[in-house]
Amino acid sequence: MAVEKERRDFLGMALGGFTALGGIAALGAAKRTWDPLPSVKAAGFTTVDLTEMKENQLVVEKWRGKPIFILKHSKDMKSDPRDVVVGDDKYFVAIGLCTHLGCIPAYVPDVHEFHCACHGGQFDANGKVLKSPPPSPLVIPPFKIDGTKLVLGEEGPEFKEMKAKKLIA
Amino acid sequence: MNKEIKILIIVVFFTLVTYWGVEPYAHSQMHKHVEDNNFAYKDLPALKAKGDPAKGKELVMGAGACTGCHGIKAAGMPAPMDASTAAASYGVNPPDLSNVGGLLDERFLAALIKNPAHALKVEHKFSDKRPHPMTAFYGAGGDMDQEIADMVAYLKSIASKEIKPKEAYEMACGRCHAMRYDKWTQMGETPKFKYKKDELAYQVKVLDYQDHLKAYMGKLPPDLSIMIRARNEHFLKTFVENPQSQLPGTAMPRVGLTAEGYEKVVKHLEEVGDPSKPARDALGWKVILWAIGFTILAYLWKQKLWSKLH
Amino acid sequence: MAHFEKAKNLHDWLNQRLAVDTLRRVLATEYWIPKNINFLWAMGMILATTFGILLISGIFLLMYYKPDTKLAFDSVNYTIMSEVGYGWLWRHIHGVAASVVFLIIYIHMFTGIYYGSYKKGREMIWISGMLLFVTFSAEAFSGYMLPWGQMSYWAGMVITNLFSMGSLELNGLVEWIRGDYVPGDAFLSRFFMLHVLLMPLIIIGLIVFHFGTLRIPHVNNQDGEEIDFDVESKKYLAGDTKNAKVIRFQWDFLSKDFFVLGIFLTFFFYLVFYHFEFAMDPVNFDPANGLKTPPHIYPEWYFLWSYEILRPFSKDIGLMAFGFAQVIFMLLPFLDRSPNVAPANRRGLFAVWFWVLLIDMIVLSVMGKVPPMGIFNTIGLYAALTFLGLWVLLPIITLLEKKK
């Protein structure tokens, strides 16, 4: 009786296990259904033409739904290892979201500073924190320099170097 | 068990009878049978001479006046007008001739050069009072059949050896039929625009083209994005081979594809309209195998349990 | 506050709060099913499973479907079919399941009619089942609107036009149902609401009710025998499982259900992957066009018999016949005047009545699909008259039936 009961349970468990396999495969398909669509991922690259930019005038581009600050350095602005250098010009490129809670800081051209209205945080023209509460500098997005164009979303050699030196965030 | 097999046979029988009546039988009553000629073009005469591509080139560029309306990228000849202007002038953008030799039947090409409305089977729309926008070739002074054979030979010589399905679609269908799922309009690939204004300006150009096309054809030819699932294989093949056979009186011209050319066009229709087919075929038998495994295990378990009960 | 003791283990903890052991006995291990049954008794479980399949595949479709006449068609045929990971799979499963579920419903229904499982205490099972048929029909119809293809539009147009009630010309009512003069955005979004929320809630409620109506009368058996479940269950529990006339729902009955389910799933998945045009009609792959009626429009196969009853008669008579056909099945327990619960082949003329009804409904279905011309019109008319006649005759036939 006990042996027979064991065999029945084994078959029942085998059936249950086999069904579970099917269930797991279905869950795998369901996970893929939640994945971002190819058209969303393809929109993950934005190209910006830098040639017409004016010094000390903030340009805000959109990349992956986020605002991207691009600021062309004027002569009096100091250099920084996080600068994006294109020919003779230097640019500050960063994701325009305050690292505190994600508001978009405003650029004040007279003092070369970013002031965040939400909780009073401040950054310098290179994105470094001047006044808390933001805990860390403005984040540098992946970028690639293509002639006079900047391709956001692609990791170029300059970006990779900054990443290695832990400068991007 | 015997009784259950009997019941199963009855259930399956009535299900199959219902299926037969409601699907194959009913559909056979809805659509009259159209013969599949496999692109034989029996109504068109065979070429009467062996063509010389070199002489053909002279004619195509010269007395044939083809390049007056048609671009030939393969010979470095750009189209004389942009798509919008062409549509305004002729109703539709004349196709580039680079690949016609590799996609269209030679008898069709010969007949087309000689009498476009006849080859295209649109004589019910065009006459002397309303001539077809493509002018017929009246000869360059010599033996017209030889000249036509030469031109056809030239067109065949410049055609790419490896025409892709998308190129076949572009040449044979794409100037009248958009494919929004492939970002294709009658004007070509839709470019990406950074500014909304430029995007809208392009859309206006496309709409203009479509208005000219609508006036030329009578109504806007349908978007073919999902046509591969909206009509069956037989319909599409017989329709493309001779539109009049399935839709008498239609403005769609016979396009003169060879059987191979048609296969390429179908491949593109499948790529755009039924892209999941390869995945479906690959996954299907695995899922069915799982179901069979489930059935076997369930049967064994059931047998064990019921050995106590019978 | 009721008395609770420190639990010995998790099982005991749950028992004190939820009486899980009692529930398990009443609903599963001591829910007694007659042993004298065949595979047709598994159709209920197959229906529950197919409904589950529809619910789950529907959930994934719902993530990407856009209920807007400008966006609906492409959200299904482009986004879901080619962009979404396995979107094509959920769409195929959902479309095929929606069609196959009606095959199982009809088999389940006719099994009930054949074995007399609608009378002598089982009337509520039958009525709740027919209500499920009506709600599943509404669910299927509303679902078919959603892809907004040519068939969606014109089926929507034709069926809502029925509500003008023929000569009563209740055009205002038709416009109210549509929320517009013609099927449009308002129409689409309200049918979306019905399909995704209201009908599923009602169906789930009715399924629970349907199970509830089964519990006391118990499931019927192949001979229509009245079983003393107390006596038979005592035999089983005492160990005499071979002679007991009953089996446990869990796992005796369910194990056989799973086997039949496996055969069903094999057939179902074959259709999903390789043979689905019957469920995904090509006409609906043309985007809806209110200015062009397709040369052939027809409802899905499971509505054809009822559609055909409408066709052969003049407008008002047709509507009355159609209304009659929708309601008459509901009245079966009361039109059958014989007290015999037995398979049809042992009920004299009722057997003839059964097979004629089945064949008649198949003929009506085929006639409902073919173009209404020539001999098809004649056959359709006679089949419709036969249908009406059968129901008129039923009380007479069953009154004449010899008592078992």
Image (tube, rainbow, N blue to C red):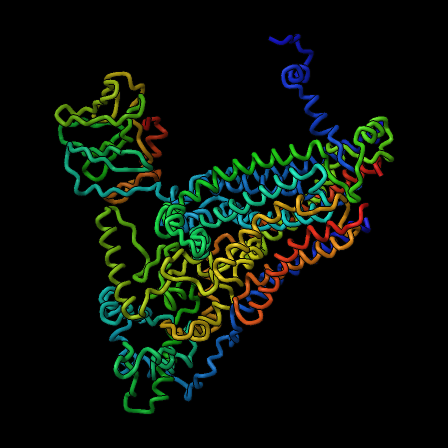
Numbered label tally: 0
Query: Which residue is rendered at x = 73% and y = 44% of the image?
Result: B296
Q: Is residue B52 above or below residue C135?
A: below
- Asked if residue B5 shows in the view, the reply is no
**Nearest the eye: B217 or C217:** C217
**Nearest the eye: B37 or C287:** C287
**Nearest the eye: C400 or B271:** C400
Left or right side of A142 for B163: right
Residue C294 horizontal/vertical position (percent): 44, 63
**Nearest the eye: B291 or C141:** C141
Q: Quadrant of the C terminus of chain B?
A: top right
- Asked if residue A115 shows in the view, the reply is yes
> Image quadrant of residue B114?
bottom left
Left or right side of B204 for C200: right
Query: Which residue is rendered at x = 29% and y = 87% of the image?
Result: B138
Residue C60 horizontal/vertical position (percent): 49, 40
> Image quadrant of residue B99?
bottom left
Residue B4 horizontal/vertical position (percent): 78, 49
Residue B71 horizontal/vertical position (percent): 28, 70
> Image quadrant of residue A94?
top left
Left or right side of B214 for C242: right
